[in-house]
Amino acid sequence: MLLDEHLVLEVLDRALSTGADFAEVFVEESLENSLSLVDGRIDKSATHIVSGVGIRAYLGLRSVSATSSDLSRDALLATAGDVAALIGEGRRIAPPISLRERLVTNVHQIDIVPSSVPVEEKAALLKRMGEAASAVSPMISQVTGTFLDVDRRIMVANSEGLLTSDRQVRCRMASSAVATKGTDSQTGSCSPGRRMGLELFDKVMSPEEIGREAARQALVNIEAGYMESGTYPVAIENGFGGVIFHESCGHSLEATRVAYGTSEFAGCLGKQIANEKVTAIDDGTIPNAWGSLNIDDEGEPTQRKVLIENGILRRYMIDRFNGRRMGMPSSGSARRESYAYTPTSRMTNTFIDPGNDRNEDIIASIDEGLYCAKMGGGSVNPLTGEFNFAVTEAYRIHGGKVCEAVRGASLVGKGSQILMDIDMVGPDLATGQGMCGSSSGSIPTDVGQPLIRVRQITVGGR
């Protein structure tokens, strides 16, 4: 345990002392190691230690939280006292606390703990990636990369008697390659990550494959033309293509917004919000997936949640506090970047489930349109669902066939509309890894889908 149980009880009692009806203590100790590579040389090596506690108390629909990087008894009791002073002015109403430890079942096997591996071995992996990318073509003018590993330990205790802990290990390598032709330069990238150790590079994707994929994308884009703006049918490939659902719809299904009516899908449970071909899931239980957790940051076991079933909205992603407002239980969806942030409902591994349409039929169904092979980042307004996404690798579709590459395309639309316009869903699910930012900080999330067809969407271009 990161804190003595008796001290945890003292802290909880102090937080409850002025009338709060619930209190929670979250303790974290994390070790983050990172390396960066520029043109074959290790440019930077850094180690970051995160250690501290977050203390919260509820009184009805009020919540107060405070944090401390000092884990001494005096500092913790003072922080809990600050919370108590803000949450109420009465006397304690909560019953005495009896903590009962709950052991967590770990489903994420870690073969090689990254934090135990010498930095020279991690640097060698990065250099292998860089050498492979540079060797793809003389047109590759620059290769950069990063390696990150995180070893996070947490403990959660609350006034309902919960006492639990978890260890969360993950690592990731990111590659970026620049292709140059005359005065023109274009980039490509690849950045796989998993809740795994260094076995990631044997079991999932080798450093050489990561580097070559980034170089391939850059070379495709340096030879690409431009897409004309307009409204087209679009095929969006599997993997990171799922960022469309994550951003345009997923955030609008989080209780963070639903509980306050600031989501376009608030009050829509049981209603059709998507084409009947669409089943969407958030699953934090997938072994070794980038966004998976044994428990969330409130100590609740994560769940497999069918959010949309054949077009019908079935569930939201809910944390404890927003669940109070909604009159619904937590779905194990509370997440926070670190103890310094207040947790709220967030996605884990969110994807559109495989369908029954053949990939070749999806492409053949489009006479004139766009095939989005790789998606980039974007932005969304959760209240309206309006979004804008960059397409990092794309091709024209002519007469039902994928043809020449195009660059500079973007997809513009509205979440509720795109859900209705997904009218074909392929069979091959794949995922992509990213970092998702919201009010509780930046957290690792998986996005995914099979190849899908969107009946029509606005494509930005030239």
Image (cartoon, helix red, strand yellow):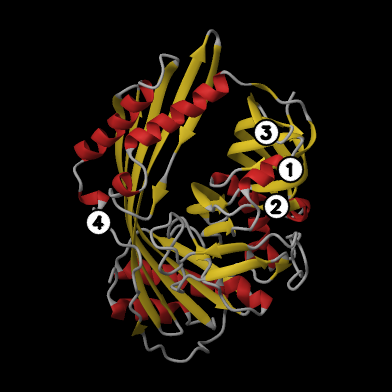
Q: Earlier in the sequence, mark 4 or mark 2?
A: 4
Q: CA distance from mark 2 to mark 1?
A: 10 Å
Q: Between residues 448 and 299, which one lies in front from this camera angle?
A: 448
Relative horizontal placement of residue 337, taking residue 71 as reference (left or right)? right
Q: CA distance from mark 4 to mark 2?
A: 39 Å
In this view, the residue farthest toward the right is: 231
Name the amino acid, label 2.
Met
Q: Which residue is mark 3?
A: 401
Q: Earlier in the sequence, mark 4 or mark 1?
A: 4
Name the amino acid, label 3.
Lys
Mark 4 neighbour density, 10 Å: few (under 14) some (14–19) many (20 or more): few
x and y percentages locating residue 332 in the rendered image: 51, 71
Residue 111, numbered circle: 4
x and y percentages locating residue 269 in the rendered image: 73, 72
Q: CA distance from mark 4 to mark 3?
A: 44 Å
The answer to whether residue 91 is above or below residue 210 is below
Name the amino acid, label 4.
Asp
Q: Earlier in the sequence, mark 2 or mark 1?
A: 1
Q: Are marks 4 and 3 in contact (CB under 8 Å)?
A: no
Mark 2 neighbour density, 10 Å: few (under 14) some (14–19) many (20 or more): many
Would residue 10 be visible to someone looking at this image? no
Q: CA distance from mark 2 to mark 3?
A: 16 Å
Quadrant, the C terminus: top right
Q: Which residue is mark 2?
A: 424
Q: Which residue is mark 1?
A: 365
